[in-house]
Amino acid sequence: MNKIQFTAIGIIHSPIKVSRGAPIQPRYARGIEGRVEIFPEYVAGLADLAGFSHVTLIYYFHKAKGCSLRVVPFLDDQEHGVFATRSPHRPNPIGISVVKLLDVRDNILRICDIDALDGTPLLDIKPFVPEFFDRENIRLGWLHEKIV
């Protein structure tokens, strides 16, 4: 296998200091404000971002310990394959969160509904455009009974 290297473009700052008891997914983090500090060499990439109400943050689960191909996720007491969950204990511990973008000033993004731990390395930002994700006949697998 080839190794793939990423470079952090910034750091996510949030009031969430430890994983125990942390909100799991932005839906359960409603109202939690944080900020994203973008490193100086990437600030030019923030041009025109302020016009979006939501952004997708792609980040590295820097506190995740190890990988398990079978996990018991937070919404169940049964074991599932890691790729059928959003567990941080993955072969590549990458997380995604869609958050509200409150403000962009210089190299700081003020955000809301953040579920990432304080100090999380940010890998990328993308504007959230719901029309790009328009899907019909969505199935939720084992999660159907848990969240519907």
Image (cartoon, helix red, strand yellow):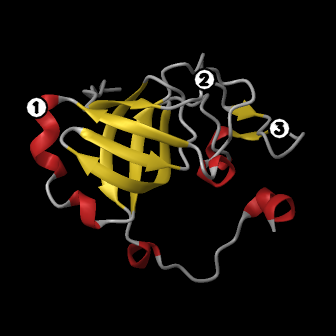
| C-alpha gap between disc 3 and disc 2 | 14 Å
Identify the secondary structure beneath mark 1: helix
User: Which label number is shown at residue 41?
Assistant: 1
Q: Is residue 118 left or right of residue 124?
A: right
Q: Determine the image quadrant of residue 10.
A: top left
Neighbour tally class for label 3: few under 14, some 14-19, many 20 plus, Cα within 10 Å: few
Check disc 3 and report the residue beneath it: 79
| C-alpha gap between disc 1 and disc 3 | 43 Å
Neighbour tally class for label 1: few under 14, some 14-19, many 20 plus, Cα within 10 Å: few
Q: Amino acid at mark 2?
A: Cys
Q: Is residue 123 left or right of residue 98?
A: left
Q: Is residue 124 left or right of residue 45?
A: right
Residue at (14%, 55%) from the top-left corner? 47
Q: Nearer the viewer, residue 31 or 118?
A: 31
Does label 2 or label 1 sit earlier along the sequence?
Answer: 1
Q: Nearer the viewer, mark 1 or mark 3?
A: 1
